[in-house]
Amino acid sequence: VFAMEVALTPGAAEAKHVFVPVLFRKQQKNMYEHSHMQYSFERIAPPRLLGIAEGATNLDVHKQLSALGRDLLSLASQNSAFDNVTQVDNLANARGETLPQDDARFVISPQQHVGVNFLDVD
């Protein structure tokens, strides 16, 4: 049994949130000549859960993911660019789709994750 603490949006009831797994991955150029994927991904930290309030925008979620990415880099004393992505499959082999920084309502398919892809972590 595991318990995870999840920050909720102030003023929004717990029932008005959807909980989405967040994956932290190192994006690497694929070295396999015959691979159909340009990049491979290595998980570099345990997943977290993101509490997303009903009606949240892409920008809201982008800000939350960016804060998690910066916090992780700070803890590891690292500096790296990163991309916030959505629609990452269960196996987490694909890059995902870049999460736009706009006011459109955030939507994610069932069984999908969001992620922070670090681009140049050692």
Image (cartoon, rainbow, N blue to C red):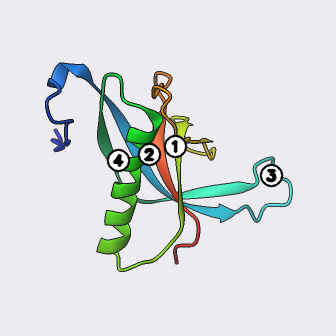
Q: Is residue 25 above or below residue 115?
A: below
Q: Amino acid at mark 4?
A: Gln
Q: Is residue 20 above or below residue 46?
A: above
- Residue annotated with mark 3: 35
Q: In the image, is 76 to the left or to the right of 119?
A: left
Q: Amino acid at mark 2?
A: His
- Residue annotated with mark 4: 64
Q: Residues within 10 Å of mark 4 (few under 14, many from 20)?
A: some
Rendered image quadrant of residue 66 = bottom left
- Residue annotated with mark 2: 62
Q: Is residue 19 above or below residue 94?
A: above
Instruction: Measure the alpha-carbon separation of dots 2 and 1.
Output: 6 Å
Instruction: Kindly check if marks 4 and 2 are in contact, taking CB atoms under 8 A apart as contact.
Output: yes
Q: In the image, is 36 to the left or to the right of 109?
A: right
Q: Residues within 10 Å of mark 2 (few under 14, many from 20)?
A: many
Please report the residue visible at 47 percent of the width from the left and 47 percent of the height from the top: 115
Q: Amino acid at mark 1?
A: Gln
Give the mark nearer the N terminus: 4 vs 3: 3
Instruction: Kindly check if marks 4 and 1 are in contact, taking CB atoms under 8 A apart as contact.
Output: no
Residue 74 appears at what percent x and percent y?
Answer: 32, 73
Report helix, strand or loop for mark 3.
loop
Give the mark nearer the N terminus: 4 vs 1: 4
Instruction: Measure the alpha-carbon separation of dots 3 and 2.
Output: 30 Å
